[in-house]
Image (cartoon, rainbow, N blue to C red):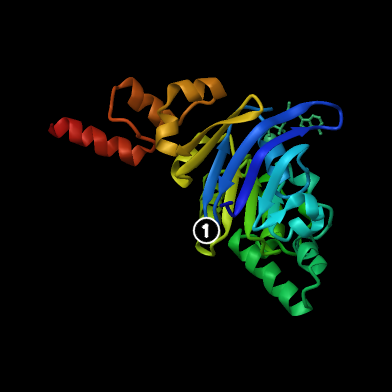
Amino acid sequence: MSSFLSLENISFVYPNGHSALEDVTMHIEKGERVAIIGQNGAGKTTAAKLMNGLNKPTTGDVWIDGWNTKEYTTAQISRKVGYVFQNPDDQIFHHRVYDEIAFGPKNLKLSEQEIEKNVHEAAEMVKIRDLLEENPYDLPLSIRKFVTTASVIAMNPQVIILDEPTAGQDKMGLETLANVIDQLVEQEKTVITITHDMEFVASNFHRTMVMAHRNKIADGDTKEIFWNHAILKEAGVKPPYISRLSQSLGLKEGILEISDFIEQIKKEKRG
Ligand SMILES: Nc1ncnc2c1ncn2[C@@H]1O[C@H](COP(=O)(O)OP(=O)(O)O)[C@@H](O)[C@H]1O
Ligand SMILES: [Mg+2]
């Protein structure tokens, strides 16, 4: 039985001959939230672009909600899978935030009323409702990221892929982002997040996939992965600071966050 979203034995070779993925298999269910981690060049973005049809597999198949991506255009697939680019400037091309967010819904041929509703709801979710009349290019990177996030949310896709969403975000931006992910999952959307920010993974994702040398080398419980030295070393990834501290203190396995750490220290003191 196939999953809601699956990559089946995918390989992907870029037109210049560079092989970016070799025999990769991934299964993701509806309403799941998954983090994808791994060093630069591991193939994370290439995999994401296979999921939304920007890339088509060289060998293997990508399935989205019963569709084989080979049989559909990128435009058709983008209605089901929205991808928020790592660099917002690769995505933004309007000079007014409202127009940028309205572009997708307009292409979906929604009514003027629905377009307005979608734009306002998406802008509300990412907390940029006051900025709809601004020129995106006048806004800082952290806000431009939210503009592109809103423009994907406004199309109401079933799957949303966020590529390095924490880049440039301060504490408030990170909270907004965590809240956006919670809301999307509540709406039964699937949220896939590519990130270097291990603290962000620890506090927002129970499931993590680790990529290294053109493949997926681990997939499972974030706690188990962040305590698995061999995998992290192979992937060149450092677990959250608090996990490293807990490990060097010889504390119970699976500590990812300050709250777990404090709980465990209290127990040790009592015991
Ligand atoms: N358009 C492209 N043409 C050729 N090679 C590319 C292209 N885009 C990415 N690559 C290469 O493919 C590999 C995987 O890249 P990417 O998927 O962007 O990795 P990640 O997102 O994990 O940093 C890297 O070696 C990268 O240099
Ligand atoms: Mg990338």
Task: Identify which residue, 270 or 208, lies in the foreground.
Answer: 208
Task: Identify which residue, 246 or 14, lies in the foreground.
Answer: 14
Q: Residue at x 69, y 37 (%)?
A: 10
Q: Residue at x 43, y 29 (%)?
A: 241
Q: Residue at x 79, y 54 (%)?
A: 71
Q: Left or right: 86 with respect to 14?
A: left
> Which quarter of the image is occupied by the C terminus?
top left
Name the amino acid type tagged 1: Val
Q: Left or right: 202 with respect to 46?
A: left
Q: Residue 135: where, in percent of width, then height? A: 79, 56
Q: Residue furthest front?
A: 1
Q: Quadrant of residue 114?
A: bottom right
Where in the image, quadrant-wise, is ligand 2 located? top right
Can residue 3 be seen in the rendering of this structure?
yes
Q: Left or right: 91 with respect to 66?
A: right
Residue that badge 1 annotates: 185
Task: Identify which residue, 219 or 185, lies in the foreground.
Answer: 219
Q: Quadrant of residue 225?
A: top left
Against 163, residue 215 (above or below) is above
Q: Left or right: 249 with respect to 159?
A: left
Determine the secondary structure under disc 1.
helix
